[in-house]
Image (cartoon, rainbow, N blue to C red):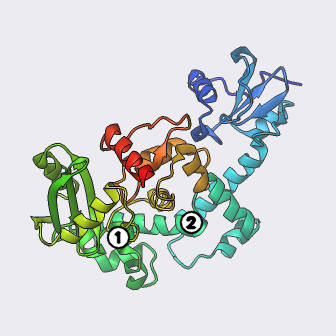
Amino acid sequence: MRTGTQTAVYTTDEDGMWGAIERRDAHFDGQFFFAVRSTQIYCRPSCPSRRPRRDRVAFYKTAAAAEVDGFRACKRCRPAEFATDAEIVQRACRLIDHTDDERISLSDICAQLETGDSQLHRAFKRILGVTPRQYAAARRLEKFKNFVREGASVTDSIYEAGYGSSSRLYENAAVRLGMTPAVYRSGGQGVKIVYTVGESPLGRLLIAATERGLCSVAFGDDDSQLYDALEREFPAAEITRNDAAMKDWITAITARIEGRSGSENLPLDVRATAFQQRVWEELRRIPFGETRSYADLAGAIGRPHAVRAVARACASNPVAVVNPCHRIVRSDGELGGYRWGVERKRKLLESEKRR
C-alpha cells in the first residue's frame, strides 16, 4: 500500500475536513474522501462507522485517488458508488444548465452521458433530492427571474429562459413565484394582501392572504411587530386589514391551534424553493397528533443526510400550523427550535395529543 503520495490532499483546510468527519457532515460528501491507514479503507465524511484516530487519516479529492494509493471502498458508506453518482449528476447538471431548449429529455441526457434512465433518476434523488425534471424546471425558472431582474420584458424572458410558450411558465407560476410573472418582475407591486390580527390560545395571531391563498400565519406578542414583519416580507404589496374578510381563515386556523383537525386543505400562496416545497409537503403528511424527527423527515423526502437543510426549511415555514413544522422534534425526543417560540410548540403538541 502506498500512502502520502501526491494524490493525497494535505491543505490548509485539513482541520476543516477533519471537523466534517467528526460531525459526519453529509454536506461534504463528494467534496473529499478520507482513508484510514490502519484498515486500508476509505470513506465518505458522513460514514456511520466509528471515527478513526486523527493521525491515521489521509484526505483525498476523489475516490479514484484513494484507490490508486491502495485503499478499499468502505462497505457501509459505499464511497465509490457515491462518487460515481455524484459525477453523473454533476455532468447532467452541466448539460441542463447549458441547454436553452426546455424540450431536452431525460433520454437525451442519458444518451450523452451513456447511462440508464433509472440510474440517472436514482442518482439525482440521492445526491440532490429532486428528479432531473424538477432540477431542469427550477433552473429554467431561475433563468427567467434573472432576465426580468435585468430589465427584459416578460415575453422575451420567457423565451430566453427556454420555455416553449408562455403557458409553460404560467402553469406553475403561482407555486414557484407566489405571483404571476409580470407581477414578479415589478417586485410584487400591485399584489393585494388582506390580513387580520387577533387573540389565540398561543398569543397574538396574524393571518394574511392573497386572492390565491394564505401567505402568512404568524404568532407574536405585539400587533405592530407582526404587521412590520408582514410588511418586510411583502414590501411592494398593497396590504390592507379586513377582519370580516378573514373570518373564515381565523376559524380554520383556530381549529388547528385548539387541536381540532380541519385546515389540511387550505389554499396556499407561498414562495419556496423546490427543496422547501418537498419538505413542507411532507410536513402536511404527518398524521394529526404525531411527531417525527428531523432525521425522519429528511429520510422521508429521500435526503437522509440533509438534516440541517430540512431544519432550515422548517425554520423558514411562513404559515404556522398549516405546514405543521411544530410536529418535528429532535431525535432524542426534545422539542428543538420553533420559529414562533418553543413554548408555543409545546402547547400545540400537547393540544393535538389530547385530541
Residue at screen point 58% across, 48% down: 296
Q: Which mark is residue 266?
A: 1
Can you say whether 278 is above or below 108 in the image?
above
Q: Nearer the viewer, residue 202 or 169?
A: 202
Name the residue beneath numbered marker 2.
96
The image quadrant where one finds the C terminus is: bottom left
Displayed quadrant of residue 77: top right
Distance, label 1 to label 2, CA atoms, is 35 Å
Are there few (<14), some (14-19), or many (20+) residues within 10 Å of tag 2? many
Dot 2: what SS?
helix
What residue is rendered at 51% in x and 38% in y? Answer: 330
Q: Amino acid at mark 1?
A: Leu
Q: Residue at x 23, y 75 (%)?
A: 211
**Of the residues tagged 1 and 2, which is closer to the observer?**
1
Is the residue 351 above or below the residue 155 in the image?
Answer: above
Image position, residue 315 (x, y; %): 38, 46
Query: Is tag 1's residue or tag 2's residue first in the polypeptide sequence?
Result: 2
Left-right relation of 88 to 322:
right
